[in-house]
Structure formats: structure tokens, C-alpha cells
Amino acid sequence: MNSSLRSQFLIPIVAMLLLICSAVTLVSWKIASRTTLAATEERLRNVLQLCSVSRFPLTEPVLDQIGEFSRCRIKVVPEVAATNKLFSSKESSGTFDAFAIRLDRNGNQAIAGSPSFLLALSDPKDRFALSSQAFWLPMATGILSTLAFCAMALGIANRMVRRLEKLESQVNRIASGHYETVHVEPRVQDAIASLTRSVNTMSQQLENAKEEIANSERARVIHMLANGMAHQLRNSLAGAVLLLQTLLRRKPDEAPQEIQYALQQIQLAEESIRRLLTISRHGHAAQEQVLSVEEIHKQLDCFTRPNSEHHQIHWHIECPVADRTRQIAAGNSVVSALLNLVLNAMDAAGLQGSVECRYAWDPVAGFHRWTLRDNGPGPNAKIASKMFEPFVTSKPEGIGLGLPTTALLAKELGGSLQWHRQGDWTVFELTIRDSCQREQP
């Protein structure tokens, strides 16, 4: 690639410069030739006119002396090839530039006999020397300029080629599955920098797509496992529920409270299976029950009370009395979402920790809002920004579907799930816009 790019960049430029240099030199030489020819003719004419009007005799010594000063040879001849114009004259010593004028008889200046001509001869080498200067000067200037420009262009080409080589290496790495980006100076705004930024963007998008494909593949596997195990798990749980209910019917007065807690935990396991099937099917359950806020809180407390008592967690739910009768259409989904958040909060709070849940109705925005907070250490910093993405978890035994499921349910119900740290507390805020409330005036 190197030689090809440099050749494509330099050869046209050098060829164009040499062509321009040759054209300028040729034009300069032609103009100089014409100029020196005209100057020679003018010089010889002036010398001959000066001799023709002079008062001294035009003897050979006098003409030789005048010719020495004017850099030419002057003599009187009986005939010439042409007058009053420059022509070429062949002499015994070579060929000369010649100019002749008619010399009338005038006392001792005229040669006896027929009319004579005054002839001036100039060596053409002098004219060629002057025209050669006009040829070599632009030629040398053009060649030196071409070399200087080629050196500068080669440096520019090398710098561009190095940047393109780096870009080529990045593309090759992307093709092999490595999506590192290349640093680009913020001040550089040329086409190569723009192309590098585009390749960096493509690399990041491919990396994100790779993660999404991996997540989709994991989701597909979980979907297959969930569908395969759901029937067996539910049958097992149904058998356990049937056994416990039989015990309760046989001795309702003597049955320990732990049996009722066991039934609640089995219901909680069934709810976990339902959530797993919900995320695997990319949607919420079709069968939803309309529940009031108070009923939702009772179910939430019923499911989580054994866990809070076992770990000695301070567990508290607050709700204004006026809002307890508000109806929520997707009651089962809300219980599932809140249950996931509360259980996560209890795991984070640990032994003798504190978990609080507060409900508030926002009449302006039309939202139900639950604020859950715990005094645990907070999420791991490595996953804090990606907690709502599937399969992101810091628990060794977790699969990272709880919070994504809750966020998905909140979005489907027209709300959202957010979190932040507030002092020593980790706060999750779940908001939904329920259809029952939208129908109210």
C-alpha cells in the first residue's frame, strides 16, 4: 500500500511540475531568441547608420576600430544579399548575422566604382549565449523548485500513509474480532481524522452488537431452559402446596404457623417462575389482577416478612391513608416488580439492616411512585452503570434478570425504574402510570 499511495500521490504532481517547467522554459527560450535577434538587428542598424552619417573617411582601420567597440565587423562591399534587414552571411571564417545599408558616394567615404554597401557582421554565438541564459535560468529554477516541492510532498505523503496504515491496522483488528479504538487528536479535522472517528464509532457499535448478540443467545438458552423446566417445577410446587393444604385441613387448629409461611414461600417460588417466563417471552403476563395499593402492600409484606424476621431486618412500608384504596390494573406485575426490589434490598442490607418502602401518588404527572431504600453498601462500582442490563450481576449465584425484568415491567406500564445513592442509603424509585388511573377524570 505504501508504494502505491506514494506513487499515486507523487507521480502526477512531479509530472505536472516537470511539464509546466518545460513549457515555461521553452516559451522563455523562444521569447529570448526573438528578443536577442531583434536586439542584434537594432544594434547593427544603429552602428551602420552612425557610420553612414559620419564625416571621417570609412577606411578599413577606422571600420575595424568602430567594430571593436560595437562587437561586430564592419566593411564596405560592392554587393549584398539584402538591405535594411537582418540576414545570414557566409564568410570565409563562418556564418554571421549580417545587416547592410546602401552607402551613397560621398567624397572620400565612397569607394570608386558602382554604389557600395556598408555591411556589419555579428557572431551568432553572442546571440545564442544571451538566449541560452533565458533557457537555463528558468530550467534550473523549475528543477530546483520541483525537487523542493517533491521533498515536501513526500513528507506529507509519508505522514498521511502512516495515518492510513494505522487505520488499516485498526480495520484488520476489527475484522479479527478486536474492537479497540484509535486515538484521534481533537484539533485534527481533516478527512482521515473524520474517517478514523467513523471507524471508531463502527468499532464501538460492533462491540455493542457483539454483547447484544451474546445476551440474546443467553436469553434464548434461558428461554429454552425456562420453558422446559417450568412445567416440572410447577408440578412439584403444586404437589407441595397440595400436601401442605391437606395438613391444614386435617388439623386446622393444631397446624403450626410455619406451614402458612411455607405456603407463602411456595407462592413466592411460583412468582419467581412467572417472572422468569415473563422475561423469556419478552412481555408481561396476560392474566393481570386489579389490586388496590393496600392489597399490593399486604402481599408484598406477606411474601417478605419471613425473610426480614429471619435476618432481623427492620422492614417498614409507608402509605398515606387516602391513597390505600387506589386501584392498579396490573396488580400482579407491580407485586412482582416490588417484590424483586425489596428482596434485593434485604440481601444488600444484610443482618440487622434496614429496608423502607414509601408509596406516593403524583396527581400532576399521574404516577404511582414507590421509593425503596436500604442502608447496605450499595451496588458494585463495576456494574453500577449497567444494572438494568440483562445478565449483569455481582452475585455469584445470580443470573442478572431481576432488575432488567422490573425495569421492563415499569416501562410497559408507562413508567420507569431509577436508582441513586443518598448518603448511606441506596434508593430505588419505581414509577408506573396505571390504566385505572388514566381512566379517572
Image: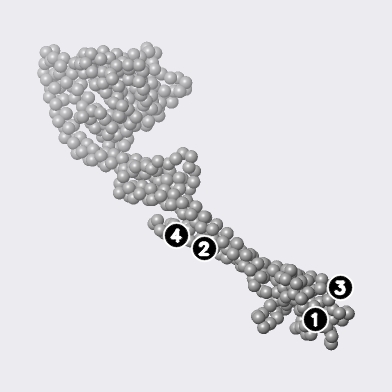
Residue 421 x %, y %: 35, 20
User: Tag 2 or tag 1, which sits nearer the N-term?
Assistant: 2
Q: Provide the residue designation for mark 2.
A: 15
Spatial CA span between label 3 and label 1: 17 Å
Residue 284 visible (yes or no): no
Query: Residue 117 has which mark?
Result: 1
Residue 297 x %, y %: 30, 18
Q: Quadrant of residue 66?
A: bottom right
Spatial CA span between label 4 and label 1: 65 Å
| Amino acid marked by disc 3 | Arg
Q: In the depicted view, which residue is nearer to us: 410 or 314? A: 314
User: Tag 2 or tag 4, which sits nearer the N-term?
Assistant: 4
Spatial CA span between label 4 and label 3: 72 Å
Foreground label between 3 and 1: 3
Counting the numbered discs, the total is 4
| Amino acid marked by disc 1 | Phe
User: Tag 3 or tag 4, which sits nearer the N-term?
Assistant: 4
Q: Provide the residue designation for mark 4.
A: 7
The residue depicted at 84 percent of the width and 81 percent of the height is 110
| Amino acid marked by disc 4 | Ser
Q: In the depicted view, which residue is nearer to us: 1 or 248? A: 1
Spatial CA span between label 1 and label 2: 54 Å
- Please tell me whether residue 66 is drawn above or below residue 260 in the rendered image: below
Q: Residues within 10 Å of mark 4 (few under 14, many from 20)?
A: some
Q: Quadrant of residue 74?
A: bottom right
Q: Provide the residue designation for mark 3.
A: 55
Spatial CA span between label 3 and label 2: 62 Å
Q: Quick check: 160 left or right of 34?
A: left
